[in-house]
Image (tube, helix red, strand yellow):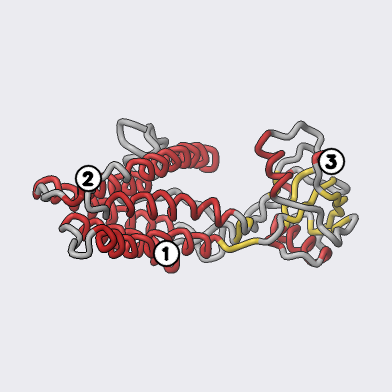
């Protein structure tokens, strides 16, 4: 028996095409992240029981556009139809002769590439300023024990990030708009790169003072616990998803019985430990922004788990830090 197929009307995406008022974010998205698809067909035919990925692939083939550049929304309410093989077309509410809107998001870059580039900043900047700042201040100065230890910890942290990006992380989305690499990289290259390195390696930095062994050891212990715990949770999350899939599962293991996102909890522990070792206030701007952003993501992740898994999911009271958030 032949599979039933439906035909969808295709229109170029634009503010005037949406049946509801766009939010401020969506207006910005329209202004900066997209343009009309050049060879957009007037209609597209897909299996009624097919996935959203099949819809994207069919539209990409007919419009001679990379599937990663397309953004498809429903004509009825402007809701995004994600490119997911786990999402059935019928479950989106689309029916025969429904209208969809398509937009070209412009040049794309892989998530993996963005991660590699943004973490590369501190790996380049810290050793350069570690060597350069003491030399220019006084050619006989050498970095202190704590400055050297701070450099080692930064290099270990971001080298671990790079290795996880290459060999551990699996991404549900293949690409993002290419210009996002500048926004994402600024956080790491400026705050954890230039900002921290400049203040930590200066000859008058608190990091040049004689180290307090107890505080340094506590900082090192927190750093090690945080890094190992963070790696463990990343491996757990990796094992929930097969390569190239957007499937989701309920994570179990170290820290997941305490909070929704123990990977973020352990990341916060890492930077608490580093702050104790370096004794530099320059760590705070980066840490506060990073932890604040992770707290927002963690709360959203908890809401997503509750929505996706319902009664199967054991709700968490705290999403990131036990007793706090």
Q: Are marks 2 and 3 in contact (CB under 8 Å)?
A: no
Residue drawn at x 41%, y 50% is 251
Residue drawn at x 85%, y 52% is 10
Q: Quadrant of residue 92?
A: top right
- Residue 238, compared with residue 275, is above or below; it is below
Residue 135 in the image, given as x and y percentages of width and height: 26, 63
Residue tagged by mark 1?
A: 168
Q: CA distance from mark 2 to mark 1?
A: 32 Å
Query: Is any atom of residue 239 visible in this view?
Result: no
Residue 43 in the image, given as x and y percentages of width and height: 88, 55
Label 3 sits on a secondary structure element that is helix
Q: Nearer the viewer, residue 84 or 163?
A: 163
Label 2 sits on a secondary structure element that is loop
Q: Residues within 10 Å of mark 1 (few under 14, many from 20)?
A: some
Q: CA distance from mark 1 to mark 3?
A: 41 Å
Label 1 sits on a secondary structure element that is loop
Judge left or right: residue 179 versus residue 10: left
In primary-sequence order, the first of circles 2 and 1 is 1
Q: Closer to the camera: disc 1 or disc 3?
A: 3
Q: Quadrant of residue 77?
A: top right
Q: Residues within 10 Å of mark 3 (few under 14, many from 20)?
A: few
Q: Quadrant of the N terminus?
A: bottom right
Q: Are marks 2 and 1 in contact (CB under 8 Å)?
A: no
Residue 213 in the image, given as x and y percentages of width and height: 9, 50
In primary-sequence order, the first of circles 1 and 3 is 3
Residue tagged by mark 2?
A: 279
Q: Are marks 1 and 3 in contact (CB under 8 Å)?
A: no
């Amino acid at each position: 028996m032949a599979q039933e197929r439906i035909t969808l009307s295709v229109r170029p995406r634009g503010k005037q095409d949406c049946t509801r008022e766009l939010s401020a974010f969506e207006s910005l998205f329209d202004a900066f992240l997209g343009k009309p698809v050049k060879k957009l067909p007037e209609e597209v035919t897909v299996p009624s029981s097919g996935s959203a990925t099949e819809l994207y692939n069919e539209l990409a083939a007919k419009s001679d556009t990379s599937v990663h550049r397309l953004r498809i929304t429903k004509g009825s309410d402007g809701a995004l139809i994600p490119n997911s093989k786990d999402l059935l077309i019928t479950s989106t509410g689309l029916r025969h002769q429904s209208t969809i809107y398509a937009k070209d998001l412009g040049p794309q870059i892989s998530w993996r590439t963005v991660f590699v580039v943004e973490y590369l900043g501190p790996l380049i900047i810290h050793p350069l300023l570690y060597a350069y700042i003491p030399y220019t201040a006084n050619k006989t100065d050498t970095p202190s024990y704590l400055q050297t230890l701070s450099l080692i910890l930064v290099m270990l942290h971001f080298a671990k990030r790079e290795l996880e990006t290459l060999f551990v992380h699996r991404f549900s989305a293949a690409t993002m708009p290419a210009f996002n690499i500048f926004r994402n990289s600024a956080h790491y290259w400026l705050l954890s790169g230039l900002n921290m390195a400049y203040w930590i390696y200066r000859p008058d930095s608190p990091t040049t003072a004689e180290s307090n062994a107890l505080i340094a050891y506590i900082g090192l212990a927190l750093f090690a616990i945080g890094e190992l715990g963070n790696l463990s949770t990343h491996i757990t999350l990796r094992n929930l998803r097969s390569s190239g899939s957007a499937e989701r599962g309920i994570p179990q293991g170290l820290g997941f019985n305490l909070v929704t996102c123990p990977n973020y909890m352990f990341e916060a522990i890492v930077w608490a430990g580093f702050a104790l070792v370096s004794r530099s206030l320059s760590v705070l701007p980066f840490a506060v922004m990073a932890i604040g952003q992770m707290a927002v993501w963690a709360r959203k992740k908890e809401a997503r788990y509750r929505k996706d898994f319902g009664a199967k999911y054991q709700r968490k009271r705290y999403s990131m830090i036990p007793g706090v958030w």
